[in-house]
Image (cartoon, grey):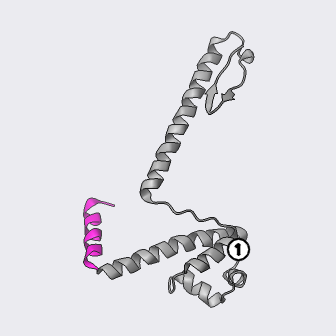
Amino acid sequence: MTDSIKNEWENLFNEISYEDRVSSLADVLALQFLGLVDRKMEMEKISKKELAEKIGTSASFITQLFRGDKKPNWNILARMSMELGLEFKVMTEELLQEKVQEELMAYHQRWSKTQEYLKLKNQVTNPHTVMAVSYADQDSIAMAG
């Protein structure tokens, strides 16, 4: 999104009332949860009618949820979760970025250990004598014989 389009979008969003912004955010949150439910239903080949029967509601109510005409309450989401074997996790953007950074750091540490192993392997005249990586706590150690 270019800066001018982004600014126009933000200006439009700032012009609506607080209550309308809350309602819009509620719609987005509901659709995020229902998007995950819909994805799982597709994977399991479960129809909206079958889901309605499983959670004890009508097919028309499920249709209204997925169209965005109604919002699911926590009990409906919990029933969907239980019946579909979904485990919802709630995460803020900041927490997500923190987890991504942790994973990148862990990946880099594993990559570094692999590079050390490859250097060690290349120093041995018979590469077949290099033993596999052994583990001591969480640190990987390459050994050569």
What element does badge 1 sit on?
helix
The spot of residue 97 in percent (x, y) is 44, 51
The spot of residue 24 in percent (x, y) is 40, 78
Q: Is residue 5 above or below residue 106?
A: below
Give the amino acid at mark 1. Glu
The spot of residue 124 in percent (x, y) is 67, 11
Q: Please name the residue shown 54% across and 28% down the image.
A: 112
Q: Is residue 3 magenta?
A: yes
Q: Please name the residue shown 61% across and 72% down the image.
A: 37
The spot of residue 110 in percent (x, y) is 58, 33
Q: Is residue 133 above or below residue 6?
A: above
Extreme residue toward the right, this view: 128
Q: Is residue 9 above or below residue 138?
A: below
Q: Which residue is mark 1?
A: 83
Q: Please name the residue shown 49% across and 60% down the image.
A: 91
From the image, which quarter does the N terminus lie in?
Answer: bottom left
Magenta residues, dominant SS class? helix
Query: How many neighbours does mark 1 have within 10 angstroms: few (below 14), some (14-19), or many (20 or more)?
Result: few
Which quadrant of the view contains residue 141?
top right
Q: Is residue 81 left or right of residue 92?
A: right
Instruction: Please tell me which residue lies in front, 88 or 58.
Output: 88
Q: Is residue 121 magenta?
A: no
From the image, which quarter does the C terminus lie in?
Answer: top right
Q: Is residue 44 above or below residue 73?
A: above
Please provide the residue range marked out in magenta: 1-16
Q: Please name the residue shown 29% across and 70% down the image.
A: 9
